[in-house]
Amino acid sequence: MDSKGLGNRIFDGFNYTFLVVSALVTLIPFIYILAVSFAEPEEVLRRGFILFPTTFSLEGYRYIFSTSTIVHSLVVTVGITIVGTLINLVFTSLLAYPLSRQDFDGRKICMMLVVFTMLFNGGILPTFLVVKAVGLLNSYWALLIPNAISAFNLIVIVSFFRQLPEGLEEAAKIDGCSDVGLLVRIVLPLSAPVLATFALFYAVGHWNTFFSAILYINDSKMWPIQVWLRQIVILSQGGIGDSTQFDQNFVQPPPQIIKMAVIVISTVPILLVYPFLQKHFAKGVLLGSVKG
């Protein structure tokens, strides 16, 4: 018993050590980004790699917010995220509900078409030509309509709807509830966990919208935050602030500080959404999972 207990303790200690090291390796890049964004320019230039700045500075954030570029792009991104998530949930629920009904004759064909889109798609150029043909270029609708429904999310929500008790549907119909009323008053309230989960998935996808914006949006004033992040980080274009807003002794922060500050600004808002949906997250994933 003692040798077995000792072996279990050694094994547990190894697991805990491995998990702690893995967590630190994962967190170090985030700590580095946060530390550099709040560090003094002289310290960044002198030390290079910083995890704990000796002095804190907001010069990078002051420079970024000296013009309305980043603020406007944040407003654009928030609008795209809210409107896009609502469109996703509405369209996905409206399609998932009839596909979950046993009395819907064409559900098998529709499900086959949905699964087909997961395996095959037209590609970038055909999609671009379709968006252009319907007049959505340089419009926010080009970022919302083509991705209104995720096939994978739809299949999971259909599976969840099928698990709802049939007795509720029968009782609602006896009370004179229509199909729309059944969906709005019975199905959707009972599906709050899974809908909250996929609302988070959709919201993160819209918040990180980048490639579609590059393809379809030509006006820089309409760019979301991720496109501006590309301009700053990838292309090293740090001149987004307005140095005229500062005194004559002002020195523009190094590009490294500006890059890290923009990364923090573009990441923190969507992270703050998760705590409000956390209680539904694990439950929604488990309830909506496909069971054999």
Image (cartoon, rainbow, N blue to C red):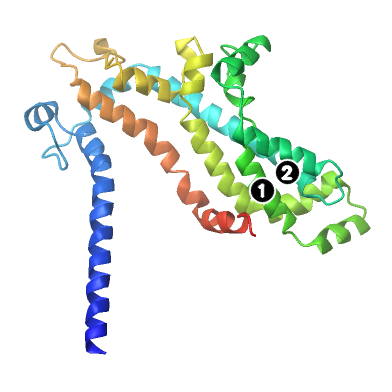
- Quarter of the rendering containing residue 175: bottom right
Residue under label 2: 96
Q: Amino acid at mark 2?
A: Ala
Q: Is residue 94 visible?
A: no
Tell me residue 11's x, y (percent). 26, 71
Q: Is residue 219 visible?
A: yes
Residue density around tag 2, few if under 14, some if 14–19, many if 20 or more, within 10 Å: many
Q: Quadrant of the N terminus?
A: bottom left
Q: Quadrant of the C terminus?
A: bottom right
Q: State the residue at coordinates (58%, 45%).
A: 198
Disc 1 to disc 2, C-alpha distance = 6 Å
- Is 63 in front, or is 274? 274
Tell me residue 217's x, y (percent). 51, 14
Mark 1–mark 2 CB contact (< 8 Å): yes
- Judged left or right of residue 222, residue 147 is right
Farthest left residue? 46
**What is the count of numbered marks?**
2
Residue under label 1: 157
Q: Which mark is residue 23?
A: none
Q: State the residue at coordinates (61%, 36%).
A: 118
- Quarter of the rendering containing residue 119: top right
Tell me residue 76's x, y (percent). 50, 23
Q: Amino acid at mark 1?
A: Ile
- Is 104 in front, or is 49? 104
